Image (cartoon, rainbow, N blue to C red):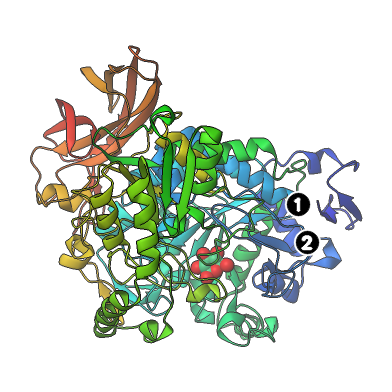
Amino acid sequence: MKCRLFIFSVLAIPFFFISCQSGREQTDEVKNPAEVSKAKLDSLLKLMTLDEKIALIHASSSFTSGGVPRLGIPELVFSDGPHGVRHEHGRGWFALEDADDKATYLPVGICLASTWNKDLGYEYGVVLGNEAKDRGKDVLLGPGLNIIRSPLNGRNFEYLSEDPFLAGEMGVGYVKGLQEQGVAACAKHYAANNQETDRHNIDVIISKRALHEIYFPAFKAVVQDGGAWSIMGAYNKINGQHTTHHEYLNNEVLKGEWGFDGVVLSDWASVNDTREALLFGTDIEMGTELRRDLNNPVYDEFYLAQPAKEMIESGEVDQRYLDDKARRVLRLMYRSTALSDHGQGKRNVEEHQQIALEVAREGVVLLKNEGLLPLNTSEIKTLAVIGHNANRQFAGRGGSSQVRSLYEITPLEGIKNLVGDAVEVVYAEGYEPYYDESLFADRTGVAASQSRENSRDVALARTANKQLMQEALELARRADAVIFVGGWIHGHDGLPWGEGTYDAEARDKLNLKLIFGQEELIRQINSVNSRTAVVLMGGSNVEMNNWLPDTRAYLHAWYPGMEGGKAIAEILFGEVNPSGKLPMTFANSHKDYPSHSVGEFPGDKTVKYTEDIFVGYRYFDTHNKEVVFPFGFGLSYTTFAFSDLKLTKHNQKVVVECTVTNTGEREGAEVVQVYVHPKQASVDRPIRELKGFEKVHLAPGASAAIQVVLEESAFKYYHPDELRWVLESGDYEIQVGNSSRDIKLRGDVTW
Ligand code: BGC
């Protein structure tokens, strides 16, 4: 709950009163957060001095930007993060120990995307909006919309997909759900922020076509379809200019072509130049002390503080640039809880935990099942649960997305709760995480990263814990079934978040090899117990060729949130039928991905996106490259049939209709994926691109009629030379399937 000053008349002499969110008396204007007119914003601006306007456009503490107390304009209050409202910092940088900041920890972004359930995207946003509002936040720093270009990016877990359409659709629901509670979304990080290595300086060399077809569309969708009130710039440069103050990205595309009237927020310490920030679209600068003096932040010295004031006073930059920023900030305040009453929020309520559970149930992906799952408690006397991750909590790590979770059900707890007294559950850790700073000493450059990779392999062999392995194997031998829970982790206890290896901010992975000796452990377990199911956590895949062939069942659980352990258990024992589908291709090695085999990753000062638009399945499918599990893939305990494809073209739209039938014995859900395949093209185009999908829940034997409408834009490409979207006439095949490599129905349309 928060109390703050509210303006209710800007035309009369300003009149203030203290307002709390409950039981206050308000004018209609305050009660109804309708869009505020430009005239009204302008009249408010007229009341402000230069200093007051400047105050609005830079930080006033670690997570607030300045207000104008004289006019009753409050500070804007921001909070991370994308899957739960982050702990309290007060005005400084360190977590407050005694704050009332426990929150709902939702499954991470990539798990949300794996549900392919747009309604859950919306519900997820509603949870975050209510929890942010309850904690007095006006802007929530999410969703993370960066495209998964390489599986090594340390922040892939926060992002949604390798596919721009899927990322956009899930992002739009999230943004709407969040903003309907009065909390502004801040979609991040705009744009092409696809690696953590050298993130403040790396210069992405990329074509405009790749930007418009791959890296922009999810942002465009949340702006135009989701109505996002703010967007966060990124750290990296694109073609020589920092994205946070990028003339093309912000002025021409976002605020020009897409008509965005919200706020471009910097990432924390992503502003590098006052003049560019003034001219090229940065509206609020945050976090600059992170790169200067963290313990003694002088907000007046931010790029958009005193230096900006001087540039405007000297006439070097016209005052209208500042007015435009201030107007946008005020508009955001009126839209959000900062200056409008959106009622009370709520936090840590059962319905939020239920959404966390639903997302985990639908987001965990069953990738392999050779007659092992679901397990049956009546056939198991002793169950061995093995693996450090079975007993590890994940909420509090990973970087800025960390959450102080009210609780977190681990897989071990989830399994024990589910089987109760019916089964004896024995647990062994099996392997242990370790951390060796020397392996991560130098973060920049390809050569450095390769030498780190080699030294890490050596260290891995050295540190796999033989004793833990033996203990685990003994349990596995005498158990009737084994559940191994391993995979990636966010980081290590006691280390600052930036030092957390693997799935963490500021670090990329070195390769996809299973860490801490797990590969050998899985192989050994498989050799002593053939009834072994493998559950892996993590924001990406791992190398699978050495253990998957002998593994009968594999479930990828990402980081499934506070109820994740329960959802995993329910899926393993068949109380829930899995329906998650991969939002990224799982190839065996990072070297198979186009960002590594065609383009560069992580580059050295510059990183060339030579693979251009051929990212993820667009590359693997077009060039017929081997993958382990394709984009969109995920198993169920039931089976589905697709039939009766009908395509109708009218009013410049194509209506795709088909029937899906649950042909198995269990209730389940299937995702109907609609891809467009241009049969001929005058430029290189991917063999297929996802342009529509629907998830459908069906009882055994039941059928549903599915309809997906494809707009004209679904058939267009961005012309590499003419730099505009083009609809080429000719034949297009509509492909309907349940993964990019399992197309079940095909039909043609002609433009
Ligand atoms: C991250 C952002 C985050 C911000 C504030 C930055 O380091 O890149 O995603 O929202 O910090 O914590």
Name the quadrant where ligand 1 sits: bottom right
Note whether residue 453 is visible: yes
Residue 74, numbered label: 2
Badge 1 marks a residue whose secondary structure is loop
Picture coordinates of residue 352, whole percent (x, y): 63, 39
Viewer-proximal residue, 262 or 371? 371
Circle 2 sits in a helix, a strand or a loop, which is it? loop
Q: Give residue 270's position: percent from left, percent from top.
A: 50, 75
Label whose residue precedes the other's in the sequence (1 or 2): 2
In the picture of the structure, the residue carrying the numbered disc 1 is 339
- State whether residue 501 is above or below residue 163: below
Local crowd at mark 2 within 10 Å, few (<14), some, or many (≥20)?
Answer: many
Nearer-the-camera pick, 129 or 84: 84
User: Percent x, y for residue 300?
Assistant: 69, 83
Q: Quadrant of the C terminus?
A: top left
Q: Quadrant of residue 241?
A: bottom left
Query: In the drawing, does residue 338 fall left or right of residue 419?
Result: right
- Asked if residue 648 can be seen in this view, the reply is no
Amino acid type at circle 2 is Pro
Query: x%, y% of residue 502?
Result: 40, 68
**Label 2 residue near ligand 1, CB within 8 Å:** no
Is there a contact, CB below 8 Å, between mark 1 and mark 2? yes
